Amino acid sequence: MRKTKIVIIIFISLMFFNSCRKDNLVIPSTDENVTDGETGEIKGFFLLNEGNMGSNKSTLDYFDYETGIYTKNIYAERNPGVVKELGDVGNDIQIYGEKLYAVINCSHFVEVMDINTAKHKAIISIPNCRYIKFHKQYAYVSSYAGPVKIDPNARLGYVARIDTTTLTIKDTCVVGYQPEEMVVANNKLYVANSGGYKVPDYDNTVSVIDLNTFKEIKKIKVAINLHRMELDRFGNIWVSSRGDYKNVNSKTYIIDSKTDKVTDVMELLPCSNMTISGDSLYVYSTEWSWITEKNTITYAIVNTKTKKIVSRKFITDGTEKNIQIPYGIAVNPNTKEIFTTDAKDYVTPGTLYCFNPDGTKKWSVTTGDIPAHIVFTHRQLKPLKK
Amino acid sequence: MTPTYSFPKTTKNHTNTIQKDTIHFNDVTIQGKYTPSKIIPVQTLEGVDLERLSVVSVADAVRYFSGVQIKDYGGIGGLKTVNIRSMGTNHVGVFYDGIQLGNAQNGQIDLGRFSLDNMEAVSLYNGQKSAVLQPAKDYASAGSIYMKTKTPTFKDNKTNNYKATLKGGSFETINPSLTWEHKFKSNIKTAINAEYLYTSGKYKFTYAKKNGYDTTEVRKNGDLEAIRAEAGIFGQLKNGEWKAKAYFYNSERGYPGASVREEPGKYKHEDRQWDRNFFVQSSLRNSFGKNYTMLLNAKYSNDYLHYVSDPRLDVTTMYVNNTYLQQECYFSVANEFNFFEWWNANLAVDYQWNTLDADLIDFAYPQRNTILSAFATSFRFEKVKVQGSVLHTFVHDNTKAVGGAAENKSIFTPTLVASYSPFNEIDLDFRAFYKRIFRMPTLNDLYYTFIGNKYLDPEYTNQYNLGFTYIKDFENVWLKKIDIQIDGYFNQIDDKIIAMPTSNQFQWTMINLGYVEIRGIDVALQFSWKIGEVGLGTRVNYTYQKAQDFTNPEDEWYGGQIPYIPWHSASSVINVQYKNWDMNYSFIYTGERYESRANIIENYAQPWYTHDLSLSKKFEWEKADLKITAEINNIFDQQYEVVQCYPMPGTNFKLRATVTL
């Protein structure tokens, strides 16, 4: 009997031997020197990686112009006490005042951080929140999760109005179905309604909210499945329609914010994402078709003054051939450097490309999963005391 | 702990408790002719060995085999699928009493739904089961799990057996079952078995970082309520046998969802699913003379699924309320020809019809007709055994919309199996096999609204296996028997069907892109001991796998280990029997792995290992036998995940009482 025990003990010890777990530590950030340092008004930018849905892998990266160092995954180590890090599917990132706001779609909140340290300040819970815009003392967040009426299939979205001092929701305004991006013009908030959950009955309107009363005053009929919105300096709102991925192509529309009328249809400007810098609108499109079962990727630069397509490419050195799924786009307002991200297969780290204003590649770097949203900062992020 | 179907030979060295509970197989086609385990790698858990494991479902038992990874979403109600030698769940054929369980919709079988209450044996075959007489389907998967339910046996002059079991324990689990077996005068036997299972699925789990946060939460909406009922009838023919079975399963379960960051306690996740599975199947085997045996199989199955996600209950969700109905009809004729003592052949033809209905927008309403034809022949010489088979698969799909269906497929795939026994005196056998097989794109892959891609090609696997078995019996020493199986293998997966994003996170499609190579070693060791009155059984399994994605040489992560495949995994079971006492200790280890083929720190998954212990005692009480078992699982309360964001339960308990009459 004793020997039996010995045999068992030896056996169990053997199994333990090779089975130790490492300490479960907060994942540290990683630095990569991607370019030479330079000084300027813009000190750096934050890049929000979405992370694949259900993986809780949204991460925040930071690029520092002064050092030329790209730092991957800064949130977790700067906020080791925040349970489960940044969250699931980061959908938008913006700066307002001294605060950095990240909209975490599938974690159902807006994460508010300090702009200088990226340290957690607060969360504002909003179910299925999508994008954020600011005006005066308020932040406006679009959400799919409006009130459920008799038909649970027909559930309108809403916009939440948040006091940026107290970081509390002050009011909500119901809009169209599955609202996406917003712009503010003439004291009105314009909201692109997609209706993406109502396939094939997409929404086709832009909701207009009077910011004095915070009531929806009208809906402008535009086209199906609206998504992106950009405001140019002429008061024109550029709105993207994703189409139905079948027979209706993606197109770009222009609304005049003075008349609230659709003035132009850019038939040949499919748009997945766009950004305005000066009078140039930078656009890319990854248009999926269920008919051809293919993605068609196109790029363009549009002159917002003439409303004409100036160029069918903004990457000029052939780098675009390496980009599988262009996903995020940004232009440094000072240097006019163009940033494009590649989300690749969504389940492995993506790539961020930095292009010179002439469209030649300056540098590139590996990011988190699904690099998507970029915001430039005038404050240098304070290094973490190690 | 017998590794083979060669029952009489391998059980004789076990202790009396094993023999008492042993039920003999009726697989006459295999018995006594040759032992397939020496030819093709097979691992089996059966009889009391299966009963001793502190497990709920077949999925939990399969974890003790080498070369296997289980994907487990946690809790009794969580989805559990099996992946053999890293080739993917869709390449695993799952057979219930000899006939394959279908899921044409997504090609995956949730082994967590199959109870061990009525199970006699669970076996895992790499390559294919190499019985001579078998349906064409048995040749059609890269690896297979065979579940065999109990066949009634009657001691002495008994004509009725009764068995009642009550299990209960952690997560508010209650699980009673009843079995009645009856023997008619005509020697026809019947068995009826029914089981009820309820669990709240609530358990605490902890996420903690050593230098950071530490949180404990309770898993919610993981409840499950299920009823299973089975009835079987078994008959003998002069030169064969027949059997028929009806199976019914009905369940309601909650989906706890991924455990991601949220404002604590803010939202309730209330997604629910209802399943109703029903099938009837029948099998007849008869020999006509010495040289010809026929096996007929038939099946009808009807699987209904209803899924609801309601924003009125969970404000974060979009409204989903969908039903799916799958039906399958299956017929098979297999014919064995014995030309000589050393040469026989099998010709089998199977026909299968599948249909899928769903209340989705623009749904394709696919129907699939499959004809499988297999020819196999085997040669058995004194030292060498060779088996070769060719499978032809013909698939024709229809959809409601004209032109919506995929093209017809007509594909030949071969298998070659050989073994060599160099010594007459020593029970040492070398074996090798090559198998090429594919899996059809599932009906979801091809036709699911907004995901499916009808242009998909099948996904192929090539397997090369080389190994040996060694068995030795001892007398007059404590060690009574050793049984060793070691195999090394190389697998290729080509045209792998993967989900690919289109233009945004909400739009995915399926494409044939992907090439994976798997190099692995499976080790299975079994030892039986007898020290005085103490019987001791030990079983150790170890797997090494290098499963690399070689899809795109340009890719930064080219050659990365594929998601969720650990390099090292192992299990061990130690069983001690003493008089009416029985103690079972089991250990499972899954080594470090990554959640993405990008093998970087962000995707690193910790190893996990659990220790389970059970103790049981048998009592005799008048004519009845009573057995009481107490189990403690995950003794050291390890907090772990098998699938990212799906925490597994910590320490849990179970009590089990069984009365047999």
Image (cartoon, rainbow, N blue to C red):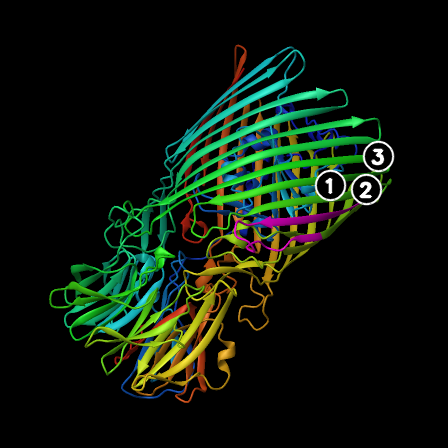
Point out the frontmost of discs 2 and 3. Answer: 3
Marks 1 and 3: same chain? yes
User: Which residue is under mark 2?
Assistant: B378
Residue that extends furthest to the left in the rendered view of this protein: A212
User: Which residue is under mark 1?
Assistant: B130
Which is more toward the observer, B454 or B141? Answer: B454
Distance from Cα at disc 1 to Cα at disc 3: 15 Å
What is the crowding at mark 2: few (fewer than 14 residues within 10 Å), some, or many (at least 20)?
A: many
Vertical placement of residue B151 versus B391, above or below: above
Q: Chain of mark 1?
A: B
Amino acid type of disc 3?
A: Asn
Which is more toward the observer, B246 or B371? Answer: B371
Amino acid type of disc 1?
A: Ser
Amino acid type of disc 2?
A: Ser
Q: In the image, which disc is placed on residue B338?
A: 3
- Taking the magenta stretch, the answer to whether it contains residue B402 is yes
